Image (cartoon, helix red, strand yellow):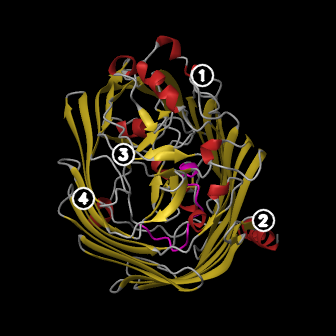
Amino acid sequence: MNKIILILFLLIFSITATGQIKQTLTRADLQQSNRNDTIADNRGANKSTSNKNVKNDAVKITDYLVVSQANDTTHVDTTLTIQKEYKYNYLRKDNFNLMPFANIGQSYNTLSYDFENTSLLPGFGAQARHFNYMEAEDIKYYHVPTPLTELFYKTAFKQGQLLDAFFTVNTSKQFNASIAYKGLRSLGTYQNVLTSTGNFRFTSSYQTKNKRYNVRGHFVAQDLMNRENGGLKDSNVTFFESGDKDLLDRARLEVNFQDAENILKGKRFYLDHSYQFIKKEDSTSQNTLNVKHVISLDRRAYKYEQEAANTYFGEAFQATTLKDTVSLENFYNQVQINYANNTLGELQFNVSNNHYNYGYDKVVVLENETLTNRLIGDIVTVGGKYKKQIGQFKVKGDVGLNVSGDFEGNYIKGEAAFALNDDILVAAQLNHSSKAPNYNVLLYQSSYINYNWQNSFNNTKTQQLAFHIKSDKYVNLSIDATTINDYIYFKNSDVDGLVKPFQNEASISYLRFKANKEFRVGNFHLNNTVMYQNVKDDNQVFNVPEVITRNTLYYSNYIFKNAMFLQTGFTFNYFTEYNMNGYDPLLAEFYVQTDRKYGGFPRLDFFINAKVRQTRIYIKAEHFNAPFTGYDYYAAPNHPYRDFAVRFGLVWNFFL
């Protein structure tokens, strides 16, 4: 309680800050060109940034700034592009490498993994519930000349809607506040798959008039609930795949159980503030020095409830009213010293302390062992960052090391980039990480006997080498090679066939190659994204499809005397057959299975998108090929993908 009061005090009386804008390794940074006040319109051409919906004609769309947690700054974008189509979903991000479940708000099976990691602490677990959980790095801060509102709406599956409402205002040039809420309720088409989720966000930022002191912070409250059915019964999988018209009413198919639900809840208070002891007055200034303090209190809890024990999970300690609850509290402090010199570059040294408290309210006694109920301790971490640009060449470095505490860990991240010209950027990355397993792998308790364990696994160690080529004119390419040692995974035990955590002793080699290119002929476009993956894994515990592809053929143009901008076309999604991971609803985790391969089915969508002033309208016929290409589509074993459905919605910005 004292920690909460402390952070609330700082949030209220210090407010929060747009820190100094951090330069990133982008083509625009490397070119350092003077930009005109223009933005790209829907076809990629430049137009005046004057916003006709804003009363003050002097205000431009580029004045509405969006600042990330890493201080990367962009502006509000109301254009309609194919990338907006890819992001018009529950997560509001491109889900190229994710396979969604049948109901919106359920989980996603992951088709491709990125092992770039700078975290030195174990994760909470229940990863299947975390796709829509907003971490600190997902929160944005704003600076706007006039009040700004955004409404995101999309229909769901039976008796439900998805809405994300956002509002921000600057009461002065120094102070900004924003408030937002994303809510979802969707009944779904199968038995007992209701989803109900909410993400509340409040942010504020403040900068003194002399720009020496910056402070910003946020409060986030989230609850993500899913009713669970364990998937179709094995006996009903054949009925689903038969395509029987009487069973197209999916509620007729039998599921493994209808009395369970899991929920992930979390609250976070976050504050970072900095003071410029030596401020950069003009372009001739040689040195800057600031001290920054970050403080965060993060609490989250995961609960699984079931009315009656089910043999799906094995034997249970009790027959009815099963309830498993686990919680984690992280209290985090970091102090940074940031120094910049025109000759040396930008340097940072930081020291962090993290107090963690994970566990349960009871001790479990099994036949051969007694499991502790909590993991409590402190981790002290030291780290540093470096950044330097010389002409068109730029380098970055980031290191971190746990120096005390129960969990060892370290990471090294290096990046170098070079702009060959105005269009082509080449970059290389090196990433090394050693990180402790997630908390739910180390300690877990449940009303089901099998789901009780306490482990002392080794750190998972990864080394990744990546190369990127970015070119709008030619092609965007990326290739990365990763070596994974002591990989942690869930799998059905050979002893009782029930899910448990394991550690792989052999090394895994993982190669990815991704290419993206859009072709254009007149007003017709063909956007292609293809990924190739190759895994060398003797134990078959790391499984991904060999090929993933997404191809969109669409037409875009102004109609109705330029009053409306239209985009319409088809999207083809496909991934090759592979041993797709299964889903465990009790753990909210995916587990390795090698009994059957899934995939190899096409998903075709037809969409009509339009923009009228600052409103973008979206209509889509999802998976319209389902009735004539076969009912063999799954998001996980025994969990079918979505049938054909028509959904619509909009994104609407208001500039006052």
Whether 80 is drawn above or below 646: the answer is below
Q: Which residues are magenta?
A: 117-131
Is 124 included in the stretch rendered in magenta?
yes
Q: Quadrant of residue 552?
A: top left
Q: Secondary structure at mark 3?
A: loop
In the displayed structure, 566 sits above or below 279; it is: above
Q: Which residue is mark 1?
A: 251
Q: Nearer the viewer, residue 567 or 109?
A: 109
Classify mark 2: helix, strand or loop.
Answer: loop
Residue behind mark 2: 362
For the C terminus, give its image quadrant. top right
Depicted 278 relative to depicted 596: above or below? below
x 57%, y 55%: residue: 142
Mark before the other along the chain sequence, 4 or 3: 4
x, y (%) of residue 551?
Answer: 28, 35
- In the picture of the structure, the residue carrying the numbered disc 3 is 579
Distance in Å between CA atoms under marks 2 and 3: 37 Å
Structural crowding at the residue carrying mark 3, measured as other residues with C-alpha within 10 Å and reported as few (<14), some (14–19) or many (≥20): many
State the residue position of label 4.
479
